[in-house]
Image (cartoon, helix red, strand yellow):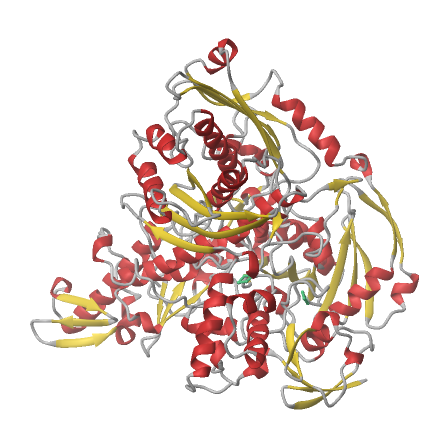
Amino acid sequence: MATLTINGEKREVDVESDTPLLWVLREQLALTGTKYGCGIAQCGACTVHIDGVATRSCAMPVSAVTADQKITTIEGLSPDGSHPVQKAWLALDVPQCGFCQCGMIMAATALLKNNPNPTDADIDAEITNICRCGTYNRVREAIKTAATSIREGKVAL
Amino acid sequence: MTHLENLSRRRFVVGSAAAVGSLSLGFHIPLAQAAAAAALPPEVNAWVVVKPDDAIVIRIARSEMGQGTLTGLAQLVAEELECDWSKVTTEYPTPGQNLARNRVWKDFSTGGSRGIRSSHDYVRLGGAAAREMLIAAAAQGWKVPASECKASKSVITHAASGRTTTYGKVAIVAATMKVPEKISLKDPSTWTIAGKPLPRLDTADKLTGKQIYGMDIKLPGMLSAAVTACPVFGGKLVSFDATAAEKMPGVKKVLKVDDTAVAVVADTWWRAKTALDALRITWDYGPNKKVDTASINKMMTEGLDAKEAFVGSNLGNAPGLIKDAKKTVTATYAYGFQNHACMESMNATALYTPEKLEVWVPTQNGEASLAAAAEASGLPVQKCDVYKMHLGGGFGRRGFQDFTKQAVSIAKQMPGIPVKMIWSREEDMLHGAYHPKTMCKLTGVLDEQGNIKAMHMRISGQSILAAVRPEGMQGGMDPAVFQGLNVDGAEGAFTYKIDNLLIDHAMRNTHIPPGFWRGVNLNQNAIYVECFIDELAHAAKQDPVEFRRKLLAHNPKALNVLETVAKGIGWDTKPAPGVSRGVAQIMGFGSYVGAAAEVSVTNGKLKIHRIVAATDCGHVVNPAQVERQVEGSFAYGLGSVLYNECTIREGRVEQTNFHNYDVIRMAAMPKVETIPIPSGGFWGGVGEPTIAVAGPAVLNAIFAATGKRYRTLPVFRHSDLQSV
Ligand code: FES
Ligand code: FES
């Protein structure tokens, strides 16, 4: 049994303690926006926020998360896709197959929280997610677009 | 009930094509059943459904796997339909419905960059017919001639009387109208929806986690399966000890999958996977257990000089001129196995009962999935159907149905229970349909002016068709090996004029199964030709662009592509200090493509600054998507040229996950400037062709920077050149 705080709600789950958080989210909690891509913290498809920090949930056993830590998944980023990062992604029509994109958005959001004006080098260093469709250049552009709209105070993060 | 096509009682055959080898099934569909399946939602015709509130649903037969095919096809239908684009959504008919309706939606196969170019005509006709029927219905109601009415943005107007109505109001009557016999399509120059850079229809749900992929499906009472097949292709399962696994939490069953794999079925996939890892399995690795990269290389190297070879093109007397030449230029290139490594690993979900089989699968070819599922279940195809799920990448891998068959084989042993089978990344890496491995020896002779007098290109290595589509072979020869190298070819023509030219193939196959991998054989052929042409230009002491210009003087489309990228990169200007340039062009998938790259190499570190790409695909349906495809395919193609190769040891693929099969990521991704130059008059592909020119353009730029040719790929396997 584990207690988790997910997208603002306390949830009880009945799983083995070494189950990766990714699979708890996907299978016990039906939050399938968080994706499985590699299972070994290589691709970032499974990125969620734990207390605001981008975390690859496939490599995080559920026992390593306490009941008070706040887990945010893509489903909890905004109720309706209105988060500034999601909006920038929509404006630039970033996704191709889309499978990596929720992880990309979660990684980008965490980056912008710590660094509202990232340089290309910052983006290179922080966004190490894999996209096999090759949307990298548009992801970079969308991060900058989101950064601008946040900085200009048009929207809050 | 009115349809574009008459439902008639006749026999027809669906080739399940590459996907299931040579299997093709003859289906006999009785009329009553066809009619029942046709009684689906109200429709104007097979392609168009109009709801009373003017919502338009356009039916799409091809699969969306990231390339924007869904949006592009909808644009083509909507263009002729003259509907309000803002109210358009799409739906997939099922392969079973297609069969029951006499294949009214025709081909479901999505590959070979054919999604749009092979169906643009009949989907536009479908949209146009629906428009005419909607107009006819309104005209009948008004008792005026249809020729006096016009449609625009889902509104029908009778100008003379000033009356208007909307599609939604006449849709039900429209469905009873006569199908127009003659329809003329709009001239692309008058398009207002097609040809425009419209946003994709499928973006919003991909940003919120709402988009459901095959891996995400959840059905009532569903169980999950993890599977592992013999790691050596051609091997078999001997036995397994499930004592420990069966006692593990959530495990329902441990079972044999055909004679090659074992699966654990549990209440969740993670529990199934954990139990699978605890199984003790004995394999018979079979005849290929000693094969490795060295032994394959040896066999293919022998083919480079072998006497016998299939001749693809032969002009003049290249061998004779080469034999008599005082001086020749020679180089040998090699390109290895690649896994598709789709972001979403292979998966399928199946529910079997003796009366019915249903399969939910991300597939590039719904009809091939249906054929494979029917075969694996032993049920007649009329009792089976396939629901196409959104694909987390395809790139050619999801045209194959090995995973569909596995899922059905598992579900058949769990009747009445839906079972979702997911491959782990490791399973996916070890059981691919790999980019074929080939080598190429090129020999050229120059005359005193530095013109190419003769050239021989000997390819040695795998044939895809021999393995997956033997019916496509021509007298033992695989014509697809010569993609981009066919003198006088239509689809992948050799663009240069060389009077004495021999291109041949010594087929050398291995047990590693080859498949269609985005770009297919154009990838390595473009590297072989375009790097060697660069080598010849260097030997002739000529500028690489000027050298190519002369060879393309007879071919205005190819020349235009070359000139466009040369201009785009600023070939006639000096690059920034430390920056070097390379160029490449080829024709494939019906399109002319070119690229020019700027790179720098500092202390053995490669930085690709930018690539300018040009594509002449004839007609463009969505220029914004063309840009994305070029950019995206460069990431995929450069990954394989620079980083990846699947190597073989003890008969199996050594690379198991992204830690030892690295791919291009953000930091290494160059800027890409895409210049679409559609010259009209033909329909070329977009998803694949341009991928092939990024590699040779970069390799030629690396030579310009370092004076060294990296001929055995991938580049970063050479210790003296790494990524920044
Ligand atoms: S699935 Fe977690 S990083 Fe790839
Ligand atoms: S959009 Fe397909 S993997 Fe990134």
Location of the N terminus of chain A (image quadrant) = bottom right
Q: Position of residue B468 (x, y in %)?
A: 60, 39
Image point 38% across, 59% down: which residue? B72
Answer whether residue B102 is visible to the viewer in this image.
no
Where in the figure is residue B621, as x and y percent of width and height? 33, 56
**x then y, percent, for residue B491:** 40, 37
Q: How many marks on residues?
A: 0
Determine the image quadrant of residue A44: bottom right
Q: Is residue B54 visible?
A: yes
In which quadrant of this rendering is ligand 2 seen?
Answer: bottom right
Q: Relative to B609, say whether A6 is above or below.
A: below
Residue visible at 41% across and 47% down in the picture: B575
Name the residue nearer the viewer: B268 or B658: B658
* Front-lying residue, B12 or B697: B697
Query: Which residue of the protein is positioned furthest toward the right in this rendering?
Result: B243
Query: In screen coordinates, is A71 left or right of B12?
Result: right
Q: Is residue B399 left or right of residue B229?
A: left
User: What residue is drawn where x is 24% and y is 55%?
Assistant: B180
User: Farthest residue in the left direction?
Assistant: B160
Q: Is residue B501 above or below residue B152?
A: above
Residue closest to the eye, A79 or B703: B703
Residue B533, horizontal then vertical, whole percent: 46, 30
- Spot the residue most to the top: B324
The vertical placement of A110 against B475, above or below, is below
Relative to A144, B127 lies left or right? left
As rendered, which of B720 and B126 lies closer to the eye? B720
